[in-house]
Image: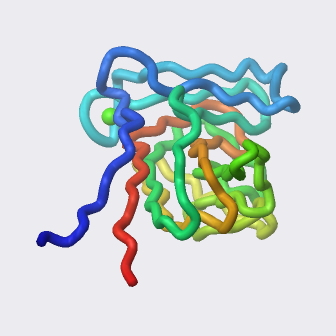
């Protein structure tokens, strides 16, 4: 038997296909920030297209899959990744990480489990919130954000978000992927 292979969860995070598979997430405090997103055809990490996320004012905004929650089991392992590129004029609040993958978990009663939320930043993973300061490093290159994690006890579903965390201006996102890893015993 071949080893159990990794399995990509199909969220179409390459932004190459017609039809939008991601929707905008605007936190309550950012409703007046003119947050927008669109498929961007002039630059991409891979293929022809990326996604441009925009905010007029300093704040948080993000995208998440139209499919929303993925059914999961405690102990399952996943790898989440994306590539991002800052455009000229992107401003990030000092001591915040810029672009973040957030994984939010829900129990079998559909209650959010915020204490277990995973934040994947360029310089590592934080659990339960962005508690540690993180310094965003300005760059005009495509950069990866990658992290692996296990599903916590009592968790039944999870949702992945790609966030601009405390920023304003435009950022490009591409190749957002989530892969179920084989369980090694
Ligand atoms: Ca692409």
Task: Decide if residue 115 is in sight here.
Answer: yes
Q: Compared to 38, does 120 lie above or below? A: below
- Viewport quadrant of the N terminus: bottom left
Judged from this view, the residue extending furthest toward the top is: 19
Q: Compared to 89, does 38 lie above or below? A: above
Judged from this view, the residue extending furthest toward the front is: 108
Residue 16, x across and y down, in percent: 30, 26
User: Going 59% across and 33% down the picture, which residue do you hit?
Assistant: 63
Quarter of the image where one finds residue 62:
top right
Q: Nearer the viewer, residue 76 or 135?
A: 76
Quarter of the image where one finds residue 2:
bottom left
- Viewport quadrant of the C terminus: bottom left
Residue 101, x across and y down, in percent: 58, 51
Judged from this view, the residue extending furthest toward the left is: 1
Q: Compared to 139, does 19 lie above or below? A: above
Q: Is residue 91 left or right of 47 when viewed as pictured?
A: right
Q: How is the image coloured?
A: rainbow
Q: Nearer the viewer, residue 109 or 70?
A: 109
User: Going 47% across and 38% down the picture, which residue do you hit?
Assistant: 173
Residue 121, x across and y down, in percent: 60, 60
Residue 178, x across and y down, in percent: 43, 51
User: Going 82% across and 29% down the picture, which residue do you hit?
Assistant: 30
- Report how many numbered discs are placed on residues in the image: 0
Judged from this view, the residue extending furthest toward the right is: 29
Task: Decide if residue 166 is in sight here.
Answer: no
Q: Compared to 113, does 48 lie above or below? A: above
User: Going 74% across and 56% down the picture, which residue do you hit?
Assistant: 96
Q: Is residue 181 left or right of 91 when viewed as pictured?
A: left
Image quadrant, ligand 1: top left
């Amino acid at each position: 038997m071949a080893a159990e292979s990794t399995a990509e969860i199909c969220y179409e995070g390459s932004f190459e296909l017609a039809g939008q598979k991601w929707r905008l997430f605007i936190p309550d405090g950012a409703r007046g920030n003119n947050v927008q997103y669109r498929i961007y055809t002039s630059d991409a990490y891979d293929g022809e297209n990326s996604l441009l996320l925009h905010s007029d004012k300093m704040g948080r905004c993000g995208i998440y899959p139209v499919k929303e929650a993925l059914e999961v089991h405690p102990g399952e392992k996943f790898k989440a990744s994306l590539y991002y590129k800052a455009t000229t004029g992107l401003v990030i609040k000092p001591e915040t990480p810029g672009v973040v993958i957030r994984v939010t978990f829900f129990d079998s009663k559909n209650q959010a489990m915020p204490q277990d939320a995973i934040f994947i930043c360029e310089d590592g993973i934080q659990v339960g919130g962005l508690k540690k300061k993180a310094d965003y490093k300005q760059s005009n290159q495509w950069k990866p954000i990658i992290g692996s994690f296990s599903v916590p006890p009592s968790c039944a579903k999870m949702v992945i978000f790609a966030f601009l965390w405390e920023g304003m201006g435009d950022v490009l996102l591409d190749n957002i992927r989530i892969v179920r890893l084989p369980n090694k015993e």
